[in-house]
Structure formats: C-alpha cells, structure tokens
Amino acid sequence: MPIKTFKAEVIQGHKGVLAVLVPFDPEELWKQKPVKLAGRRHGWLVKGSIDGEPFDGYIGLRWDRFFIMVDEGFKPGQTVTVKLQPTSNAQTLAKAVEQSKITTQPKRARADLA
C-alpha cells in the first residue's frame, strides 16, 4: 500500500486528546474496512512517522472527521509532517484498542463490523 504524506496542525480535541486531522478517507484510499476497537469504536490501523518520529496507531472517525492521536511530545498549533500506511500488526491493534478507550465512541457501532 502506498504511503500517504501530508502536513497538518496538532489540535487539542475532546477530553484533552492531542490529534491531527487526516485529510483523506482511508477506506476509500486503501480499499480496506476498519477494524473493531474498544466498545463501539472502529478505525484503520496505521504505521509511519510524525516529524520523523515512528508512529503506530489508528485513524479514527468522529464527527465526520478522520484523525490520529499524537503523543504528548507535540503541542497544539504545531505543524507536523505525517507519513502513514496501513498495517495489520497485532501490536498496533492492541495499542489502538487502548488508545481508542479515551475517545468518545459513536452512539451506534458500525453495522459491517463484527
């Protein structure tokens, strides 16, 4: 799968979560369904880098916006270069499940995920 590179601003989201908005739909770009995460949450597992620092986690979808959560080493307002590609790594899935627990979950789980 191709690596997607973009620049984005770090924002402070709901519950103080630091995030970057992802400017593409991963399902459309990579032709992959998301995976089930904690509760009713879902997301697309990714690996890559943020400003050259290794990153693994997931792309989430909330309020019609795609996002990734970033580490506390980044600051709101900071512009970063993000490189992402899909992965199916079990360790990334475990990390994504834990990360997702601190985000607000949708009222309904996505119907096509078991």
Image (tube, grey):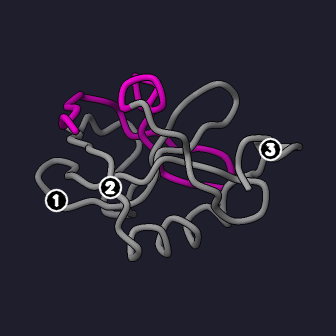
> Which secondary structure lies at badge 1?
strand
Instruction: Depth check: give the residue in front, 43 or 10.
Output: 43
The residue under the point 31% across, 30% down is 8
Q: Amino acid at mark 2?
A: Thr
The numbered mark, 1 or 3, whose residue comes first in the sequence reads 1
- Assign a secondary structure to mark 3: loop
Vertical side of 65 occupied by 96: above or below: below
The residue identified by callout 2 is 87
Mark 3: few, some, or many residues within 10 Å (few <14, many ≥20)?
A: some
Between circles 1 and 3, the one closer to the viewer is: 3
Q: Which residues are magenta?
A: 1-30
According to the image, label 1 marks what residue? 53
User: Which mark is first along the chain, 1 or 2?
Assistant: 1
Q: What's the mark number on residue 106?
A: 3
Direction from residue 22 to residue 50 in the image, left or right: left
- The three-letter amino acid code for the residue at tag 3 is Pro
Q: Which residue is at 61% across, 61% downward? A: 100
Q: Nearer the viewer, residue 59 or 110?
A: 110
Q: Nearer the viewer, residue 20 or 79?
A: 20
User: Which of the 4 image quadrants contains residue 82?
Assistant: top left
Residue at x-position 39% and y-position 63%: 72
Q: Using the image, tell me which numbered label, if any, was put on residue 83.
A: none
Q: CA distance from mark 2 to mark 1?
A: 17 Å
Labels 2, 1: front one: 2
Q: Is residue 40 left or right of residue 26?
A: right
Count of residue discs? 3
The answer to whether residue 60 is magenta is no
> Residue reaching furthest left?
52
Marks 3 and 2, the one that precedes in the sequence: 2
Q: Quadrant of the C terminus?
A: bottom right
Few, some or many C-alpha atoms within 10 Å of disc 1 (few <14, some 14-19, many ≥20)?
A: few
